[in-house]
């Protein structure tokens, strides 16, 4: 896990995510449980959205219905957030 900055929660990772995409887990839920994805805070997390391509994410906040953190755009980390209902599956390392 990359080191956290002085504030911890607002610092992106200091290095890119892994180059290999993990295997997608099987899911059958309507929305991701916040308690399940909360264990991925401050860890490299691969997210498969319900639509669109998957991406690396570094969550720093998990709420009841949304998540925020840093999304890898292929070159750098960008702060973003989205609704947990938009996530089909995720895995963190």
Image (cartoon, rainbow, N blue to C red):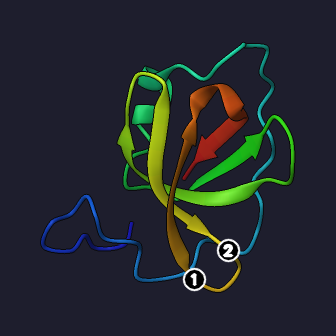
Q: Residue at x 76, y 41 (%)?
A: 49
Residue 47 appears left or right of 23: left
Rendered image quadrant of residue 62: top left
Residue found 52% across the figure and 71% down from its top: 78
Question: Picture coordinates of residue 90 (x, y %)?
Answer: 66, 39
Mark 1 secondary-structure assignment: loop
Q: Residue lying furthest left in this view?
A: 6
Q: Look at the picture and state if 29 lies above or below 60.
A: above
Residue receiving disc 1: 76
Give coordinates of residue 27: x percent, y percent. 77, 21
Tell me: residue 23, above or below residue 12. above
Residue 41, above or below 4: above
The reply to whether dot 1 and dot 2 touch (C-beta < 8 Å) is yes
Q: Is residue 90 above or below residue 68?
A: above
Hey, which quadrant is residue 13 in on the image? bottom left
Q: Secondary structure at mark 2?
A: loop
The x, y position of residue 19, in whole percent, is 72, 75
Classify residue 91 as left or right of residue 9: right
Q: How many marks?
A: 2
Disc 2 designates what residue? Answer: 73
Crowd band around label 2 with a 10 angstrom C-alpha radius: few (<14), some (14–19), many (20+): few
State the residue in front, 79 or 27.
Answer: 79
């Amino acid at each position: 896990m990359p080191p956290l900055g002085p504030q911890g929660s607002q610092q992106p990772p200091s290095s890119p995510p892994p180059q290999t995409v993990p295997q997608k887990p099987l899911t059958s839920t309507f929305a991701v449980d916040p308690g399940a994805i909360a264990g991925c805070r401050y860890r490299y997390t691969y997210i498969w959205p319900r639509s669109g391509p998957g991406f690396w994410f570094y969550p720093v906040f998990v709420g009841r219905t949304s998540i925020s953190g840093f999304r890898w755009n292929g070159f750098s980390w960008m702060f973003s957030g989205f609704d947990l209902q938009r996530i089909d599956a995720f895995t963190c390392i």
